[in-house]
Amino acid sequence: GASTYCATGTPSSSPAFTSLTSNNPLNWTCNCIGAGCTTQTCTATKEAAAVDGTCGPAAIPYLYSNLAYIGAMCGNGNGIASPVSPYVNTLFPDPGNSTIWTCGGLNTGGRDSEHCIATRTNICIPSIVCSDSSCTDGFITTTCHDDNNCGPNIITETPCPCTPDAFDTWTCTTSPCVDGIETYTCTDSKCGQTITTTGNCTCIPNDAWTCGPYGDCVNGVQTATCTEPKCGYTETISQSCSCTPSVTCASSACVGDQITTTCTDANGCIPQSITKTSCTIPPVCIPSIACSNSPCTGGFITTTCHDTRSCGPDIITRTSCTTPPACIPSATCRNSGCVNSWLTTTCTDSANCLPLTMTQTKCTPPTIGYATNLDKSDNYCTNLTTFSWDAPGQTSYQLQISTDKTNFDDNMTFDSGPVNSGNTERRFLLKTDSMDSCRGSHSCDFINYGVPYYWRVQIWK
C-alpha cells in the first residue's frame, strides 16, 4: 500500500526529515510487490536558503590620500553582480570621483543589493590646527588635526621645559677684580642654566708682579712692562743703558723732484731719520732701432742693430748660415683693373728669388657699353654653337658662360682685345662622347651637348 516514502511498494528505509539539508540529500528504494514489477530509487533534496547581496566595508567615503579600498567590496551574497560606474571595471576611484557597483543575491530568491558607492575627495588643501597638552610624565603631547580631513591626525611628544629649583641649587664663581669690576657666573645644577652678572669691586694687588724683558736702548734708556695678575694692573719701568749705533741708509729714486733718504739704527740707539734732497729727472730716451743683415759670408750672417736716437750702443750678433745655390727667378705679373685712375701691377716670383713688387701707373677707366642684338645659332652638322652680338668698333669684350645664372666663374670667361668689326661672334663646339677635338678652322671651346647654359656679354672702350 501507499506510504510517506513510496506510492506503491515498500520503502527500503525511512530516513528522518530532520537530517535533510541543502548539502545532504536523502536516498531510499521503493521495492515492488508481485511478479514483473520494477524497483525504483528515490532521492529527496532541499534547496539552500535565499541570501540577499549586501555591500561590503569598502563602500565608504575615502580621503584624497587613500590609494586602495579598505575591506571587501561585497558582504553577503554572490559577489559583485555588475559594475555601474565606471561601467567597465570597479577600480579604485580617482580623486573627486566615485565607483558604483551592486552585490548579487545567492540561491533562489536571493536579491541583489542596492548600489554600493565608494567616493574619493578631490585634491585636498589641509587646514591644520594644533594643541598642546600639559606636562605629564616629563612630556608635552602635541596633537595636530586637519579640519579638511586631508590626512590623519599627527601626534608628537616633546620633553617638558626644565624649571630650576630654589636658588640654593645654584653654584656661583667670581672673577678677579679688574678696573673696579668683577663678574659673577652662576650655574643651576638641575637644568644647566647659566646666568652672568657683574658688580663693582675694589681690587687689592699682591706682590706677584711679572715683568717682561727690557727693550732696545734708545737715547740711553730702555724700558720693560710689568703686570699684576690679580687686579690686571700694568706698569712701565725703565733703566739707563749704553748703546752702539749701527746705522744704514737707503735712498729712493728721483720722484717729484726729490730723493728720499731713510737712515735706520739697527741697535735702536738713534731714532730713524728721513731727509729729502732736490733732484732733476733726466729725459726718457725712446730708442728707434733699425737692423740690417750682411750676406752669408764665411758661414755666418752678421746682424747689426743701430739706435738712430743713440739711447744705447749698437748691437751686433752673428748666426750660422749656409750659402744657398744660385736662384733662377720665375716671375708672374698681373694687372688689376683701372681703379680710381690707377692700374696696379703685381709681380710674384714662384722661386722666391725676387721679392714681391707692386707698381702703379696712371690709367683711364674704360667706358662701359652695352652689346645689342644678342643671338645664338646652332649648326648640328658641324656641331658648332655661335654666340653673336653687335658692338661699336674698337671695343673690347668679355663673354661669360655658365650652367648657373647666379654664378659665373672664371672657367668659362673669355676676354678679347680691341675688336674693329661692329659684329662680334664666338663659336663653341657642342661636345659629345665621340668628339675629342674642335672641328673646322674656327677658334672654339667645348660645351656639353644637351646641357642648358646662360651667357652674358660686357663691352667697353
Image (cartoon, helix red, strand yellow):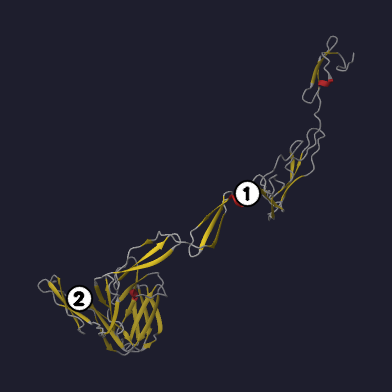
Residue at 27%, 88% (x, y): give it: 361
Q: Amino acid at mark 2?
A: Ser
**Is residue 442 visible in this depiction of the protein?**
no
**Residue lying furthest left in this view?**
298
Quarter holding residue 6: top right
**Which amino acid type is shown beneath numbered disc 1?**
Thr
Asked whether the residues under the numbered discs 1 and 2 touch, taking CB atoms below 8 Å apart as contact, a structural biologist would say: no
| 337 up-or-down from 15: above or below | below
Q: Is residue 94 left or right of residue 222?
A: right
Q: Which residue is mark 1?
A: 158
Q: Residue at x 75, y 37 (%)?
A: 75
| Relative image position of residue 81 (x, y in whole percent) | 75, 40
364 or 176: nearer the viewer: 176
Up/down of 96 relative to 255, above or below: above
x, y percent for residue 92: 68, 46
Q: Residues within 10 Å of mark 2 (few under 14, many from 20)?
A: few
Image quarter in which the N terminus is found: top right
Looking at the image, tell me whether mark 1 or mark 2 is earlier in sequence order: 1
Q: Dot 1: few (<14), some (14–19), or many (≥20) neighbours within 10 Å?
A: few
How many marks overall? 2
The mark found on residue 330 in the picture is 2
In the picture, the disc for residue 398 is none
**Eyeballing the image, is 294 above or below 2?**
below
Residue 29 in sight here: yes
Distance between the alpha carbons at the discs numbered 1 and 2: 101 Å
Residue 402 left/right relative to 78: left
Q: Secondary structure at mark 1?
A: strand
Q: Residue furthest top?
A: 35
Split into 4 quadrants, where in the image is the C terminus?
bottom left
Q: Residue furthest right?
A: 1
